[in-house]
Amino acid sequence: MDFYYGLLQIIGMHTILGLSAYIVLLTGQVTLAQAGFFAIGAYIAGMLTVLAGWHLVPSMLVAAVVSGTVACLVGFPALRIKGLMLVVATMAFGEAVRLFWFNFDYQRSKGEALVGPLGGEGFKQIRYFPENGWTTGEVATFVWIWVALIMAALWWIDRSRAGAVLRAVGEDELAAQSVGINLTAVKVTAFAVGGFIAGIGGAIYAHYTTHIEHSNFGVILATFAIAYPILGGLTNVVGTLLAVIFIQGFLVEGLRFLGDWRNLLFGALIVLAMNVRPRGLIDERAMLFLRRMFGLAKRGTNA
Amino acid sequence: MKLSKLLLTTAAAALAVTGVSVSAFSADREVKIAGFGAKSGVVRSFGVNTEAVMKAAVKHINDKGGIKLGDGTMGKLTASFDDDRCNAEEGISVLRRIASTDAVVAVGPTCSNVAEPLFGILQKKVDDASDSGLQMPIFTDTAIKGGLAKISQWAFRNVPNETVMYQTMFKWLMGKHPGIKTIYGGVEEDFAHSRFTWYKVMKVRSAEAGYDVKGESKWLLNDTNFTTQVREMKKAKPDAIAISAHPFTTCGVLKEMQRQRVKPKLLIGLTSSSSLETLNGCAKQAEGIIIPTSFAPVTDDARAAAAATAEMGGSADLHSAAAWEIVLILADVMEKQGIMAKPDTLQADRRKIRDGLASLKSTAGLLGKIKRTEEGEATKPYLYVHAKTGEWAVLHDPSQQ
Amino acid sequence: MDLVDFVQSITDGLLFGATYALIGIGFTMIFGVMHKINLAYAATSIAGAYVSWAVGTLLPLPALVTFVVAAIGGGIVGYLVYLCCFKFIPVTSPLATLLGTVGMLILIDEIIVHETNGMPQPYPALFDDVYFEIGEFYGIRGDLLFIFFLSLIATAILLYILYRTKLGIATRAVAQQPVAAQLCGISIERTNASTFVITGLLGGLAGAMIGASVGVLSPLLTLPITIKGLIVTVIGGLGSIPGAIIAGLLVGAFENFFQALRGVTERDMYVMLLLFAFLTFRPGGIFSKTTSRD
């Protein structure tokens, strides 16, 4: 059973990572900076629980606020550009964050050992969960409470006026601007919220693996962050969750019985998925279909 | 139409996820060892070799009749192998999967950056009820970064002790080539293991042996241009150069050294480079490089192990050969501790294996006796090898003095 | 560190920058024609080099022929990438194409790993025994000089194709006005496909040059080259070939200079800073006109 709880934890934290890119993608911006925010969240939260001895929840919130603030600061200059330029700029930012942690040393002695981040050798012994006796099931529940909160919040934003504004900017900037929407404010807000969410995800990641190092937060992770919402479709948050289950649950864990073929199929199936469903797993048509099914069922109960 | 396909895929995904093998114990009492390591990405050769070695060693034991269980019946050893992509998250997931099956012990992983987080999720001290970490014995064959097994009492390693190896090798070199006084380092700065080995092992130990360390030049794991670094080496005019890097950049640097005609009187390499990869990439330039290693086919046992591994389609090198020793050690421990290999004794069996491993003071190895430390590490016998006409040849055996 | 050292590291960097320039040209051309990013491009280049390596293990080839085979291999892989990630995905789903090329990048890498067990493979070079020494410590690598000139020749041929042949005119027409080009009877699909083949040829050559300059091939090469190639594309200005060439050399020189000055761990941070400086002060790239394009 522990294995499934562990898998649930992985799916949960990748969903959070994917959702952090989802809200930015809604505004039409492709960002490769999420791995950077994820790293900031991971290191800050790890330092707070290990070095300062804080409880996990406030550590996570502080980490998320820090990465959200950084996102906001980076957002102002970065979001003046778009398209490929933004992809490259955000990638460069993510790499810069990674290189920062690569050059960052801050160790203090705790007991007989030195703890804290140590540049290229990583930050070890972030053992908050086992040290406090959390079982895998409890950790999985904890992770999923966060996932549920974030998904609910994004769902609500999506359904509210704010969501309409975000999508308007994503669909047609010029039209959005001409009805009086402040493009910069909208984009930077989405970016900051994305950074905040990624910070929470990173904090969970650090405590999940108990050891983090700069190489965990490279371009590959950033690519996966946008891959989830793109693969899932930008219609709603459920798509992202579905895409994470597809990649982490099916491609990574589910295909394990295929042995060596698993590695080869990984890339091939992503290519195939994009050819078959270019608008994502859950697109407008799928939603229409689901809604009709749901609607029919409702009418049935009413009658 | 497309939607039904989508639903099908999702269903298939769900099925595949839940369909993890929960195979029942078979009648003829199987003892399952679960191997794991990298079989994708640039370090795929690690996993391929370890898997072949494990299969060969398991066959070796079963051919001799298997393992005598606690109640006197004979059990058959079986081995599985999972890929962790050299990725921490996936490694943890693989270990949890192994822990959920009937495997009594896990062998792996191949990458230090997986081993370190992995040991972190284990219970730190045995019988510490307040620590909810995983209780599963792990015996590591490849991940070599110094001092990891002390992270948990459930973690054991059978990897060479670099500190000891380089310490004695530098002393020996000092005696053999008294004219060589200065040394210069080359280090792959962004890889935890190579970095650790240069700064905490090679640099310290060579200075201790009386060498004058002139400094080091640094490069990154996937660098392609080494002109500046090699020029730094050239300027320092060292008698000896020590390179702490993995095969890809080691070869790049060696080729650049050839171009700039940097010819140190001595060339020293990282333990991990004493495998096939370096010679495959740049045999000509690596000629003469001296490396301390814990494996070479010099004894009858070692030759037999290497041959059995080759039959399984792998190559026995300092990393994978450790898996052979591990399987033999585990078989020994299982018999001594009298494990039962029954579904209801699974956790007890795991505990017995852990206790058995922890109580070992020394074990047999392919090159001779291996000493075991309190922290779960090994002090393995070792040799100095050097690259000679495209092959590794034994230069000196420190135990034969 | 004195002046001679600076000159030396900048020279080294400039020469090595030629390979970045080749990769940058490929990215920028595909973007110019299709207005899409092909993240699998650097992987295509390395795949081309691997194809020539594989052919070389079957029958021994002289280095120059190996490079030609690499270019052909790159062209073939380039066409496959077009088929898998561009041909069937609708133009209105740029994100799907982007992710498709990521999948392709992973797939190409994994195929290489599968065939070679991830081990570094030796790759031949030309003039790698030539080293022009200046004084005791300084010098210029003969093979890098060769790579530099080969890149210039390849670029010249590319520019000739683009500006002097029918195919080139069609390509440029599609890049500037796809609808008008179609009305003139130019097949957009064929033009797109030929762009991938041409950039693939160029990429295969670039991959071979990178392999030759390091002396070994490894799947480790793809990711850093992808990153460098994208940076070069943006600094050079999207769609600008001369811009990509100059930016490639500039990035090569810049990173080597800062490596000599600040060390290897901080080197890439300065490259990122250079990129930020360009994005802020000259978002259209080196040869930007007053009106910047998307």
Image (cartoon, grey):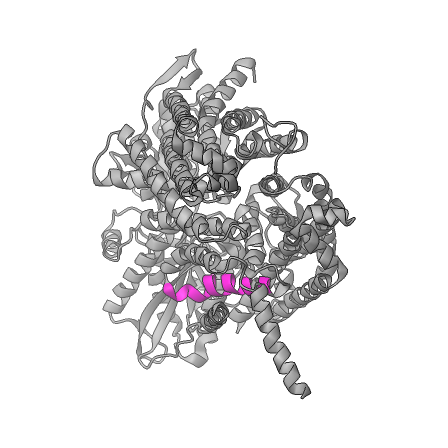
Image: A4 above or below B118: below
Residue C265, magenta (yes or no): no
Residue situated furthest left in the rendering: C59
* Residue A87 x/y as whole percent: 59, 43
Residue situated furthest top in the rendering: C135
Q: Residue at x 62, y 77 (%)?
A: A294
Residue interval drawn in magenta? A239-258
Residue A242, magenta (yes or no): yes
Q: Which residue is drawn at 64% across and 65% down?
A: A143
Q: Would you say B92 lies left or right of A34 here? A: left
Q: Residue at x 69, y 64 (%)?
A: A155
**Camera-side residue of A203 and A272:** A272
**Camera-side residue of C182 and B172:** C182
Q: Can residue B126 be seen in this view?
A: no
**Camera-side residue of B12 and A140:** B12
Find residue A141 and report its image quarter: bottom right
Image: B131 above or below C221: below
* Residue B21 x/y as whole percent: 41, 73
* Residue A197 x/y as whole percent: 68, 56
Q: Would you say B372 lies left or right of B151 here? A: left
Q: Would you say B31 lies left or right of A111 here? A: left
**Total marks drawn?**
0
Residue situated furthest bottom in the rendering: A303
* Residue A270 x/y as whole percent: 46, 57
| SS majority, magenta | helix
Image: A216 above or below B241: below
**Camera-side residue of A184 and A123:** A184
